[in-house]
Image: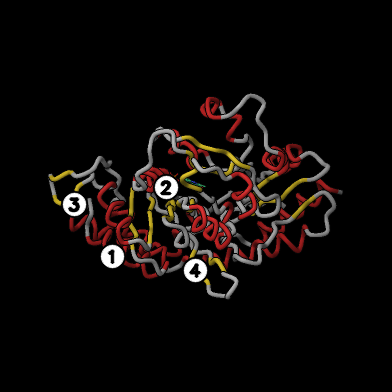
Amino acid sequence: MTPPKIQMVDVKSQYLKIKEEVDQGIQEVIDSCAFINGPSVKSFKASLEKYLDVKHVIPCANGTDALQIALMALDLNPGDKVMVPAFTYVATAEVIALLGLTPVMVDVCPDTFNLTKKIVENNLTPDIKVVVPVHLYGQCSEMEGIMSLSQEHGFYVIEDNAQAIGSDFSFQNRRTQKSGTIGHIGCTSFYPSKNLGAYGDGGAICTNNEELGQKIHMIANHGQKKKYVHDIIGCNSRLDSIQAAILEVKLKHLDAYANARNLVAKTYDEAFKNIEGLEIPFRASFSNHVFHQYTLKVKGKSRDELKKHLSDNGIPSMIYYPIPLYNQLAFKKYVPDNFNLTTTEQLCNEVISLPIHTEMTSDQQEYIIKKTQEYFQ
Ligand SMILES: *Cc1c(COP(=O)(O)O)cnc(C)c1O
């Protein structure tokens, strides 16, 4: 038997299922030549506002810009501190440093891989003006607790929702709210492999705050409210019309895509839950999971050898993330010598993400499961 061809993400097969609608959307933009801020951008903005049930969505060029613009909107002073998890993609902390602010890296919860109320509370100092919870792999951070701390202490909360768009956070009173709409500002990415992926770069910022919404809109557009009148320093960050047309089509499928990912995750869970040395993803009671990544922890056996074993059998896997942010040379000046965080260190050595996407066939998944089990026999 030749093993099935397996990719981390299968954007091509997904495209073929929606090809007609996507192609038509792209063609309409080309026919109209409204390449910048065309009707498709306005329409997608409105559709995403409705889907997320949020007052303002401001589309922008990518997820990193979204985070940068969110910070620019908060009137911070040079050197102000911003709390971020040390176990995240570089973009979360990079924009803080880029704006002359100071990233404060903290540890994450070993179960959810995210910030918790307790972690934020234990690391809080009066000069921390913003906290950036990252909803890693597709599951929300403990937003209710973090928001109550924010009210008590007066810091802002920017959600890095690049990996969790579409997930629901459940409050204790059972009310639910979409991830990215709970903090003062939420940021997301439409990078092609993300759950709502464009066919190029894209991102968005959202907020329920009227004043912040206006300001973010201005910042993303050269600080102007009126053409050629610039009240504040901004930047140029736009979602292009072709990407907006594609995203409009894909947004309609986002919930079905999350369901497909959950089915794959459930099958993996069943296959791996009784393997000694393997820990399946934890499901938080306060959030559903949209499984941007399916990430296992390898305990007591070599994670890197498992990765090699899979690779030798034609199965890709990824390590998100192999190096704690505080060990990256770029952030050297922000961390004391020999700084290290227990859980972050452990996760960088133990996590492995398996292929998960909306088009996974049972043949492919059975093969991945078989080869993974083989390593532990
Ligand atoms: C993808 C990602 C980003 C950045 O998004 P881009 O669109 O690639 O700029 C930021 N934060 C996290 C957690 C991400 O996964």
Indicate left or right for 251 with 131 as reference: left
Q: Where, by quadrant of the figure, is residue 31 drawn?
A: bottom left
On the image, numbered disc 4 is attached to which residue? 177
On the image, numbered disc 1 is attached to which residue? 43
The residues bearing labels 3 and 1 have C-alpha atoms spaced at a distance of: 20 Å
The structure residue drawn at horizontal position 18% and vertical position 58%, both measured from the top left corner, is 32
Q: Do the residues under discs 2 and 1 have CB atoms within 8 angstroms?
A: no
Mark toward the viewer: 2 or 1: 2
Front-most of 317 and 370?
Answer: 317
Rate crowding at label 4 as few (under 14), some (14 to 19) or many (20 or more) other CA atoms within 10 Å: some
- Asked if residue 177 can be seen in this view, the reply is yes
Please tell me the numbered disc located at residue 63: 2
SS class, disc 4: strand
Q: Earlier in the sequence, mark 4 or mark 3?
A: 4
73, above or below 272, in the image: above
- Asked if residue 312 can be seen in this view, the reply is no
Q: Earlier in the sequence, mark 3 or mark 1?
A: 1
SS class, disc 2: helix
Q: Where residue 79 appears, x then y in whole percent?
A: 43, 33
Q: Where residue 29 appears, x then y in whole percent?
A: 24, 57
The residues bearing labels 4 and 3 have C-alpha atoms spaced at a distance of: 30 Å
